Structure formats: C-alpha cells, structure tokens
Image (cartoon, helix red, strand yellow):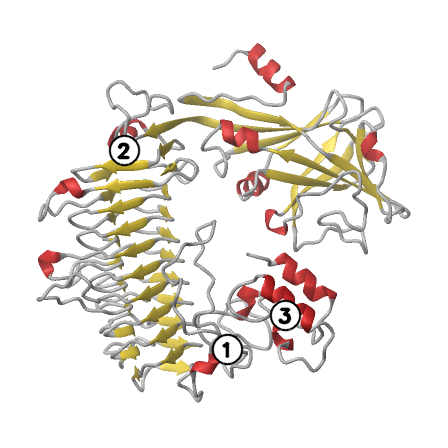
Amino acid sequence: MKSMWFLIICVMFSLLVQLSTLQADIVAAATQGKCTCMDWTNPSAADTVQSDIRLRTRESDNTNYKSWLQFDLNAIYTANPGLKGNIVIATLTFTGTADNTQPKLYMVNGLNDAADMEDWDPDTLTWNNAPGNNIIDANLDPAVTTANLYTGTIQPGDGTTDTCTSSDLVSFLNTDTDGIVTFIMTPGWTTYFYNAGSIHPPVLTFSLPDYSVYFVAPDGNDTTGDGSIDYPFATIPKAVSMALPSDTIYLCGGIHYYSDTITISTSGTSAYPLTMQAYLDETVILDFSGQGYESKKKGIKIDGSYWHFKNFTVQYTDDTAIYVSGSYNTLERLIARQNGDTGIHLTVDAAYNLVLNCDSYLNYDPEEFGEDADGFGAKGPTGGGASIGLGNVFRGCRSWNNSDDGFDFWWAGNGVLVENCWAFRNGDNVWGDPNFTGNANGFKLGQGGGEHILIGCVAYDHTSKGFDLNRSTADATGVTLYNCTGLNNSISNFTFLNPTTGAVHVLRNNISYAGTVNIGSLIDDTYNSWNGFTVTSADFISLDETGIDGPRGPNGELPKLGFLRLAADSSMINSGTDVGRPFVGSAPELGAFERAELTGDCEPDGDIDWADLACLIYNWLDTDCGYCSGADLDNDNNVNAIDFAALAENWMQ
C-alpha cells in the first residue's frame, strides 16, 4: 500500500498511478478538465460562467442553468492496463461554495459515448449547440444522454463536499470506448460547485479490490519472470496458476508454441471476472503444432467460469481448438483455424457463454476424413444423457471452409441463440482427401432437442443444406428462424421437415434464392420469400461475395458489404412481419439485413463513402430523382439538410 503522503502528492498532480503486479484500493484519480455553464435565458451565446471559479445548476421561471464537465481518462487507462471497462467502484466528488446557504439538490447525467459529441468547446458552447441538451425546454435529450447517474445534496458552506457513487455511474464509465467522459449537471435547486479553475475541482476516483496484471510473452520465463511487462512469464498455465478473480492476463504479440492442452479451471466471479487477452492491439497466435498427429489433444480447455478471452488466434491443435464446459464466459474476437477438429465447441454443462465476433475456418479432422470438424459447435454426446447448459449465445461469428458444418448443434439438449452469424463454403474438400465425408451444411440444428433461435444469419454456398432442422426433437416451442438468408446451397437453402414430436417450428422473414426449400406442411412458415414472392438477382444490391471473409471492423464487427442486401426497389422491403427486431418503414425487410443498418447508404452499395455524398447532392430536393428512396435517409419523403446530417452521423460506421 502506498503511503498517504504519496497519495496526496499524486492527487495534487491530478493522477495517481500504481502500476505494479499488485494494485489495491485507489487505482487512479483525475481532476476535471474542460467545463462550462449555460443559461436558458441567453440561448444564442456562450455563457461566460466558465471563466468563473464556479459551476452552477439552477431552475426557476426565467432561468435554467446546467453545467457540462469533462474528464480525459486515457492517460489513466494507459498507465493502468485492465482498468478500462473493468471499473468496480467510481466516485465523483464535488465541493460546494459559500453561495450555498442551505442544503442544495443536484443531479448528475452522462453524455452517451455513442452520441459522438465529446469534442465540445467550452468557449463556443451555447444552449443551442450543447451536447445532449434539449433546446426547447429544460430537459436533456434521452437519445444521447444517460439520466440520473446520481442525485446528491451539497450541504451549506464553503468547502463542503458530496461524493457520487452508484452502480449506474460505474456502468456508464465501463461502456465508454474513447476514454473521454462528459457529465451534465442538471438543476435540483440553485447549487454552486467549484470548477477546474479552483483549488477544489471535481475529482473522479476509481477504486478496485486488489487485482493483479500478468504478462505472458514468447520470450518470457516462468522461473525468473515475475509476470510484469519487463519480466513476463513464458506460458499461460503459469499466469493462470497465479490469477485470482478480477486479475488480467495480457498475451504479448508473437507466436506462443505449446505441445500440450492448456486447461483453465480457475474461475472468476460475476462481480470480479478474470480476463485473458492480447496486449493492446498486438497479434497473438497460440500454436499447438507440437502436440503431434493423433494425440487427440485439445488446444484450450475452459472448465472455469467468469472469464473474458479476447483477441487471439488458436491454430494447429490435433483436436478441438477451444473446448468450453464452464459457464458465464465471453469469447470475443478469437480465431480458430487449421485445427484437427471443431474450432470452438460448447460441450456438456456449458451455460450462459457468449461467443462474440469470432472466426473459425479451415478446421479439418483427417482421422475422420473431415466428418467432425465444424466451425462452431454446441454439442452433447450422441444419444443424449447429458446436455449443454442454458443461455449460450453465438453473435457476429463467421464459419467457412471447415471440413464438416459451419454450426452444428448435435444432441445439444438445450437451445442456443445465434444472431447475425455467417456460414459459407463449409464441407468443401480443399484438402484433397480421397475419402472425404464432410457433411457440408451451414447451420445444422441437431438431433436430440434444443429450442434454438437463429436471427439475421446467412448460409451461403454449401454442397448440402443451408439451414437444416436435421431431425431435431425439440420440445413444444421448437426451433425459430427470423430474418435469415440462404443462397446457393445445393440440396436446399432451408430443410424443415415435419416434426416427429409436438414441436412447433417457426420461420419468419427469411429469404431463399438460387436454391430450393423443403418445408413440411406442419411447419409454421409465413412472411418468407417462398410465401408468394418471386426472387431475382435484381432484388439484391450485390451477389458478389468479395470481402465475405475479409477484415472485420475496428470493434470486431462483421464487414459491411453490398452482398445479399436488398436493393431499394425490391418487393421484399417492408414486407416482413414484426418479430421484435428494430426496423424502419412500415414493416421489417425479409432476409438477414435490415436497411436501417446502413442509414446513409444513398447509392446503395452496402457501404457509406464519398459516392453516397455525391448521390445525396445529386438528389437534393429533386422530387423526380431515381434514387430518392436511398437519399431520403430520415424517411420523411423529402431530401434535405437533415439527410446530410444523417449521412454525416453514419459516415464510415
């Protein structure tokens, strides 16, 4: 524990940094940066209160003061790896002035990170351009602000303090992505606070229970290393053996070679999960080529719970790359490639795991001639007797060129939610195996039960089936498919035969093109492309798959392509039924891509770029334009300045 004198000195310099293997109690404290205060009585000009030593909130019949204050936390996050997104306790402290002659109520609100309004200038800010402000009345804009992070009271007298601590404040800070946070003080009564120009500025303090940061590097040493960034460990098992709940293990860039399975049995807790991720944006590859052929060794075996694994690659295992039996884990931005069995496999007892924005490709099991290596699996033993757990989710994942199926839920027993996932070209014999037996399906929904839900998924270019019920024995609720698209799957795009149980399988808003459907008479299927639509190539912006296996976006999101997105004049736009997904217009689109996802795509080609700006200018107020439906970004049947604002807001998103 650092001494009290050291803490005082660090706070005076606006930053407390304790970056050592063990960090405890106060992790970092930052003093407020830019600030301003504005009054409703003079909305067109910047208020001059920011030059005063005070901020204020006030509400009366003829005035309304709000204060904006901002913290830049990036230096703190850089000095404290693992803090960002993992804050447990946050305290915002305000100091009152002599103007407060009686207890005064105030409220703290936050400017949402997604609003992209952090770059405000206190010298030019006005009531009319202040981020999150409703210029018509005294309220905040609920679309871009988080209200009621804290409601507090400043006691009478100069130098009295109030500390804001709440779970909402912690949640607000943990969802921040750019390290810049803006708080908006709204009136409870006339309240005065010291600001950054005073000796008592607002201070934002982060506290955590004891936690450790460990580094693992290819050139590390398990014997002489201490796990610090200068003296890292050599292996993940060594770091895992040291880790306790809330600890973080950073994997340094390079190829980490292993000849045995990495078994992770340690668990975090719901409040203090464990983390293992690539350090910064370094490229990390875990290479298991040393296991040897027919060793049947897995890559990473996750028996523990409450882990967050992020941003690394697992390759060349002899068996499954990542095998999960634990629960409440997040697997994010992982790549499983060229392994000897399924890339990522949730097995018996695995529950409430999230597989997010992961890729799995070129996995192949030569011992079984390709029949077992799926991209992603949620599978139990054949014949039942044991099941995966409840609550597992695959979201934003891609599976391609695996020797068996893209996603396989064989004998899962419990349902899996699959959202916005793509499967393509699985089951192609790219290995030249003369005895190849890969099944070649996109999404195989498995025998043995499981009330699976698939939403917004794509199955493309398989020699067997795109979406296959596969003799599912789900219970009464059955399997549900909403807004999925099947293209060019040789046997069928959708195969849903009549159930042998009392299950009710539901299909809504799906598209089949360049392939057949095989739908039993007992299947509940309406509002799909085969229910009265004639689908042609003209219904799509593009049928060019280029980029489907290309780089993801900066946050791991799937690439935005024109591929399979509906053209502006397709009859399948606004022709679906409401299944609970966001949509614009009178009804949802059919297929995996709602046009609302690409607001600003004026041309349209599935991307937002200079061509969209040119399109919008060309159609400016032109009531006879051919592309008005694409240029009318806010859907008000007019192309005007508001559409330019919508384009700017979504530029390159």
| 124 sits left or right of 392 in the view | right
Picture coordinates of residue 73, whole percent (x, y): 58, 33
As rendered, which of 111 and 44 lies closer to the eye? 44
* Proximity of marks 2 and 3: CB atoms separated by less than 8 Å: no
Q: Label 3's element?
A: helix
For marks 1 and 2, the one nearer the N-term is 2
Q: Residues within 10 Å of mark 2 (few under 14, many from 20)?
A: many
Compared with 400, 276 (above or below) is: above
Visible residue check, residue 368: yes
| 108 sits left or right of 319 in the view | right
Q: Residues within 10 Å of mark 3 (few under 14, many from 20)?
A: some
Q: Residue at x 29, y 68 (%)?
A: 442
Q: How many marks?
A: 3
As rendered, which of 609 and 601 lies closer to the eye? 609
Picture coordinates of residue 457, whole percent (x, y): 39, 67
Q: Residue at x 24, y 67 (%)?
A: 446
Res. 297 image quadrant: top left
Q: Amino acid at mark 3?
A: Cys
Picture coordinates of residue 237, whole percent (x, y): 25, 32
Measure the C-alpha gap from mark 2 to mark 3: 52 Å
Q: Label 1's element?
A: loop
Q: Amino acid at mark 2?
A: Ile
Query: Mark 2 — residue?
Result: 236
Measure the C-alpha gap from mark 3 to mark 1: 31 Å
* Proximity of marks 1 and 2: CB atoms separated by less than 8 Å: no
Measure the C-alpha gap from mark 1 to mark 2: 49 Å
Compared with 626, 234 (above or below) is: above
Q: Amino acid at mark 1?
A: Thr
Query: Mark 1 — residue?
Result: 577
Q: Residue at x 74, y 74 (%)?
A: 621
Q: Label 2's element?
A: helix
Query: Mark 3 — residue?
Result: 615
